[in-house]
Amino acid sequence: MHRIQGLLLEPVGCLAEFPPGPFHEITVRLFGRKSKASASASRTYWHLLNLLETIEAPLTPDQLEMIESLELEAVEQSHLYEDVVPALAQLKAMGIELLMASSLSGVALHRFIEKNGLADFFKQVWSRDEANGLKATPLVSALHAASLPPENAIFLTDTVEGIHVARAAETHPFLMMNDPDEAQRLATYNPAGGVVSFHEIPDFIRFVAAQKRARSEEHTSELQSRLHLVCRLLLEK
């Protein structure tokens, strides 16, 4: 893996525990779906995004207001994971570019940041409104604005849709293993890595950096050995 310089974050499922109800309610009101709501907010949220992508005609102002209202409801009911702020502080101190890239509306995303006091951590905040698109679009917009090569960033996700979105943005999917059984299934999609807690991410990035340094030092040592051999052979002629 390339050196990790940036971390792309979608709040739902990776930064906070969200309720699935408001996202399911959007699918009911907008698409008439009557199926039982999933217990997983992440799966419900990404299912909603897949449905939103199928809409060809522009949404009406009333529909947009309904979606934003329910997303705000989900944000207000969400609970930030307790290890997020300490880990973000470590990552910021390490010089990692922290990029909020979400398919939530701008109103909901900025309220999430405000509610949890996260503004100091994120120079780049891209919602679906700011990026003018869903799923991979906010990721691409955030990477472009930060002048960060996609191969030097990872996108934290806990769903197969998130893995596909990361690859669509040409960056590395990184698995948040909230559910052991689901994580085992998602591991078959070959994510770049995985953690069971957000506080493990700084250590993973340090580990990758240490491996890169070790390989670089090994390569330098090998080149020096070859150079010494060439010099010795020349002197013996």
Image (cartoon, rainbow, N blue to C red):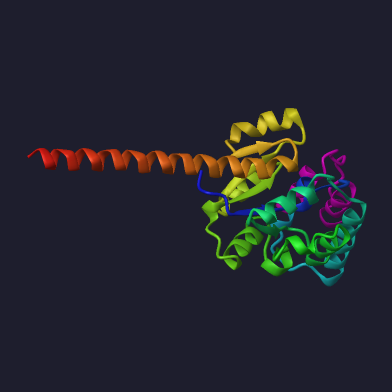
Looking at the image, residue 169 sits to the left or right of residue 18; the answer is left
Q: Residue at x 74, y 60 (%)?
A: 121
Quarter of the image with the C terminus is top left
Could you say where residue 130 lies in the image, as x and y percent from the top left? 71, 69
Q: Nearer the viewer, residue 231 or 184?
A: 231
Residue 100 magenta-highlighted: no
Location of residue 199 (image quadrant): top right
Q: Residue at x 85, y 60 (%)?
A: 117
Location of residue 127 (image quadrant): bottom right
Q: Residue furthest bottom?
A: 61
Taking 15 as reference, is 120 above or below it? below
Q: Residue at x 77, y 63 (%)?
A: 120
Location of residue 195 (image quadrant): top right
Could you say where residue 75 lies in the image, as x and y percent from the top left? 87, 56
**Is residue 9 shown to the viewer in this render?**
yes
Could you say where residue 35 lies in the image, as x and y percent from the top left? 85, 41
Could you say where residue 80 lies in the image, as x and y percent from the top left? 85, 49
Q: Residue furthest front?
A: 235
Looking at the image, residue 79 sits to the left or right of residue 105; the answer is right
Q: Residue at x 68, y 47 (%)?
A: 156
Residue 29 magenta-highlighted: yes
Looking at the image, residue 78 sits to the left or right of residue 179; the answer is right
**Is residue 54 shown to the viewer in this render?**
no
Magenta residues? 21-50
Taking 43 as reference, is 104 above or below it? below
Please identify the dominant SS of the magenta region. helix
Task: Report how many numbered discs are placed on residues in the image.
Answer: 0
